[in-house]
Each structure stands twice: as C-alpha cells, then as structure tokens.
Image (cartoon, rainbow, N blue to C red):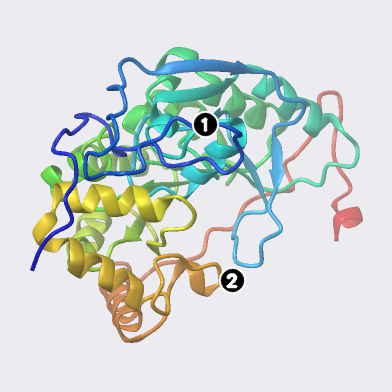
Amino acid sequence: MEFPKFEEKFFKGRGAQINPFNPFNNANLTQEHFEGLDEALPEPRETQYFIEQPKKILNKLEMPDAAMMYSVNPYQGCEHGCIYCYARNSHNYWGFSAGLDFETKIIVKHNAAELLEKVFMEQKWVPGPVTFSGNTDCYQPVERKLAITRSLLEVCRKFKNPAGIITKNQLILRDIDILKDLAKENLIFVNITITTLKEDLRRQLEPRTSSCGNRLKTIEKLAEAGIPVGVMIGPIIPGLTDSEIPDIMNAAADSGAQTANYTMVRLNGALDKIFTDWIWKTYPMKAEKVLNNIRSTHQGQLNDSRWSLRMRGDGELANSIHQLFYLMRDKYMPKKKAFEYNIKSFKRPGQLKLDFDLFA
C-alpha cells in the first residue's frame, strides 16, 4: 500500500500542522497541496493574543443533545492544541483558520466577569448552572497570568449561582479556595477530561495540556477537598484510544471521580483535513485504520451532524464502545449518582431571598 505523501516538517508543541481554508475570508494564506507543491507556511512562533470587548458573555445552548443550557467562554481559540477539538471551526468566524491559527491566535475577553455579573443582576435571570469551557478550555495556559476564569468563579460565588467546569489543565487547583466555597452549597461540579493514559500519545494529541498523571492527581486533590468531580473520556478515537476505556475508568475512580461520561470523535468542518493530515504524519501505520473506524461510527463519514447520534455514533463499533463504557462504569463507579445543582441559594446583593415558585 502507498501512503499519502505529506510534508516531513513537523511543528513541535502544536497539534494542527496546517491552516486549512477559511470559507468566511475573501483571501486566505493556506497550504492546499500537502505533497510539497506549495510553499510551506511559515513556522508559528510565540502565541499571539487579541483583546476583544464583547457585549455579552453568556451563550444559551438550544441544541437538543447539549446537556448544559448556558456556557461562558473567556477565551476563543485554545493553546492546548488538541487535534480533534470541535471548537476549531468557530475560529473561522473571527477571521482565522481552524488549524494552527486556533492554537496560536487566542482571543481574550477581559470584561467577562463584568458581563456575567450584569446578567445575574437582571431580574429576568433564572438561576441555573453556567458551564465554563463550552467551547475552549477556560484553564488554558494564559489563564495562569490573566485569571479571567477565576474572576468568573468569584462572580458565581458572590451570587451563589451554580457552575460547571470542563478542563484538561491542573491549573484549576489554583482556584480550589473558591471551588470549596461553592461545593459547600452544591454549586459546583468539575469534569476532568482524560483522552488517554499514554503520555507519548497525549503529547501528540494534546501537546500543551497537563500530563495524564497530573490530571489524575487533579481529580484526587479536588475529591479530597470535597469538590464533586467526574471524568470525561473523550473524544474516544476508535483504533487509537478506545482500548484504554477500562484503564481510564479504573484510574479515575481510584483517584476519586464520582461519575464518568464519554463522547465519540467526529471530524466536522475543517477537522477532516486537520486530523487526516495529523494522523498520517504522526501514525502513518495506523492512519487508514483509524480513519476507517471513525467513518464506521458515523455512517461512512468523518463528520456527523445528527442530533444525539453525533456525539455517540452508531453502528457495530460504536455500539461495542458504548457497551464497554457502561460495563466499566458499572464496575468501577457502581454508586454513581447524578449531581443535582442547588439553585435555591441564589441571591443578588442586598436581596434576602428569591421566590423560586416564580421559576417553577
């Protein structure tokens, strides 16, 4: 078998190796011929940051298969560089590419906390969980310096509004003081994403994330502090990470994870080009099998836009992964219980109590 020919040059420390075409731009600087006919794109150097002053920060999700109703994203783009990230496509709306641009050109929203507080002060706000990292990781590297996510959590603590967090970064432990305060009143739930326990694979899949071991330690420290925490296994990449489901579940449960969930990889939009380029460059002997496995879980396509099925897939392989996941969850987390957020503690400054019968 002849493998597709790709540029040998590899951008270390980055996930995507290309900048695919942005359909929203009139002009694009892209490399369309990966066989070397084009001049290669210049190597990305330091990450660039762009300041945005949005008029609103809360995003209401009305998708039928989205578990969270509201999300807050203090950043657009993510330096973690996860090669499979569905959020890459959203970078096109900002005039950037979903490839290298997504992880090297980060948009920062300094006024996020101010905007969230404004929402909570509105009489029409119905108390409910707000999820951080609905699009990109709220604890990506720049958060260590800017602390925008911390300021958002402080707003939730001030109003006693429930919050959820999904992250791959142990930086969340910096804010354990706020998380403990929220946990005392059932106002917080944290999910730590673990895609693989193989550190060499993690470096390729998610080059600027916390190590596998540190994520397990993060789960352990959160659990020890009384903060409800679960593990998100995903996305599962059949032929690359699916065999690790039992080990991840076992390790996460031993570390203190209360619950587990998973998603199946789907290569929507520009991800088909980005991921295909990446898999042939990093794992050429596995590339064809992995891509075919992904197709087999999405009716022969790399992408899947079907509600409910897009994150789980279907077909024989998807069903076997589904069964394995729930078998392992029943084995390692038999006492799992759905977390219930407390919405009755919400109050605005100077307000004694809300009449929650109005929200029934």
Q: Please identify the residue farthest to the bottom as the structure is shown.
A: 316
Question: Going by the image, does 59 lie left or right of 312?
Answer: right
- Residue 102 in the image: x percent, y percent? 44, 33
Q: Nearer the viewer, mark 2 or mark 1?
A: 1
Residue 286 sits in which quadrant? bottom left
Placement of 13 over or under 134, stated as above or below: above
Closer to us: 206 or 127: 206
Which image quadrant: the N terminus?
A: bottom left
Closer to us: 260 or 11: 11
Placement of 268 over or under 324, stated as above or below: above
| Mark identifier at residue 307 | 2
Q: Which residue is mark 1?
A: 96
Closer to us: 289 or 64: 289
Mark 2 Cα shell of 10 Å, populated few (<14), some (14-19), many (≥20): few
Which image quadrant: the C terminus?
A: bottom right
Which type of secondary structure does the marked residue at label 2 adopt?
Answer: loop
Question: Going by the image, does 261 lie left or right of 131?
Answer: left
Placement of 153 over or under 269, stated as above or below: above
